[in-house]
Image (cartoon, coloured by chain):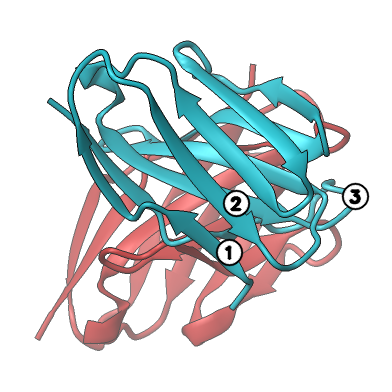
Chain colours: A cyan, B red
Amino acid sequence: DAGITQSPRHKVTETGTPVTLRCHQTENHRYMYWYRQDPGHGLRLIHYSYGVKDTDKGEVSDGYSVSRSKTEDFLLTLESATSSQTSVYFCAISESSGNHNEQFFGPGTRLTVL
Amino acid sequence: AQSVTQLDSQVPVFEEAPVELRCNYSSSVSVYLFWYVQYPNQGLQLLLKYLSGSTLVKGINGFEAEFNKSQTSFHLRKPSVHISDTAEYFCAVGRYNQGGKLIFGQGTELSVKP
């Protein structure tokens, strides 16, 4: 298994509070991705990173920000959580080129916003 | 715009029966395709991938898929399913030179009954 961990694995928070999810990899892969998984929608890309301090938006980036200060860590922040952000969040990594390489997924974080 | 449609949200099947999970995509440029499997409360694992070459792709656990460019389809098949194949299956499409970004289908729940 690819060395990807996500923390926390479960979190319950209240509307309006900030939340940060962490993805940590030990594979030294260049590309990292954050997805959210919702019933009937599959996985949707939130943000991705193609190197340290290099990030870009995905298809559902509103309300989310990311940071990547080290190769191994990719943080996803909800500045002010809303109930619509209740979801399961997956981090994924991919090898250096990014093109047509498979993505390896972490175990997920289940976030509930009350 | 690129999109992926998995035509069946749920597929119930009896053990040892054959199964086909359907995936159609839309794209005006060349693509590469994946099928991922997600077992309950886990992340996604790669089943198989099509990059180029032979249109029939074999994956793990006895699954195979056929790329059909004219019908823009990438259907997943298994001749005889087991109880352990019960999971959610996702089709994903990527375009070259897009930073490895993938578009996922909505998912198909395969339920194998004894």
Percent from the top left, x then y, of residue A27? 75, 67
- Name the quadrant of the N terminus of chain A: bottom right
Q: Amino acid at mark 2?
A: Ala
Question: In the image shown, does B54 or A53 lie closer to the viewer?
Answer: A53
Instruction: Characterize the local packing of mark 1: few (<14), some (14-19) or many (20 or more) Cα atoms within 10 angstroms.
Output: many
Q: CA distance from mark 2 to mark 3?
A: 15 Å
Q: Earlier in the sequence, mark 2 or mark 3?
A: 2
Q: Amino acid at mark 1?
A: Ile
Q: Quadrant of residue A54?
A: top right
Q: CA distance from mark 1 to mark 2?
A: 8 Å
Q: How many marks?
A: 3
Looking at the image, residue B2 lies above or below residue A2: above
Q: Quadrant of residue A105?
A: bottom right
Percent from the top left, x then y, of residue A80? 35, 14
Q: Earlier in the sequence, mark 1 or mark 3?
A: 1
Instruction: Characterize the local packing of mark 2: few (<14), some (14-19) or many (20 or more) Cα atoms within 10 angstroms.
Output: many
Instruction: Please give the name of the residue rendered at 48% of the width and 11% of the height, measured from the top-left corner.
Output: A62
Instruction: Please give the name of the residue rendered at 21% of the width and 52% of the height, measured from the top-left corner.
Output: B10
Relative to A5, B52 lies left or right: right
Q: Amino acid at mark 3?
A: Ser
Instruction: Please give the name of the residue rendered at 82% of the width and 50% of the height, measured from the top-left corner.
Output: A30
Residue matched to label 2: A92
**Chain letter of the residue beneath label 3 in the structure image:** A
Q: Quadrant of residue B94?
A: top right
Looking at the image, residue A93 lies above or below residue A20: below
Q: CA distance from mark 1 to mark 3?
A: 19 Å
Q: Do the CB atoms of the residues marked 1 and 2 lie less than 8 Å apart?
A: yes
The numbered mark at residue A97 is 3
Looking at the image, residue B107 lies above or below residue A106: above
Residue matched to label 1: A4
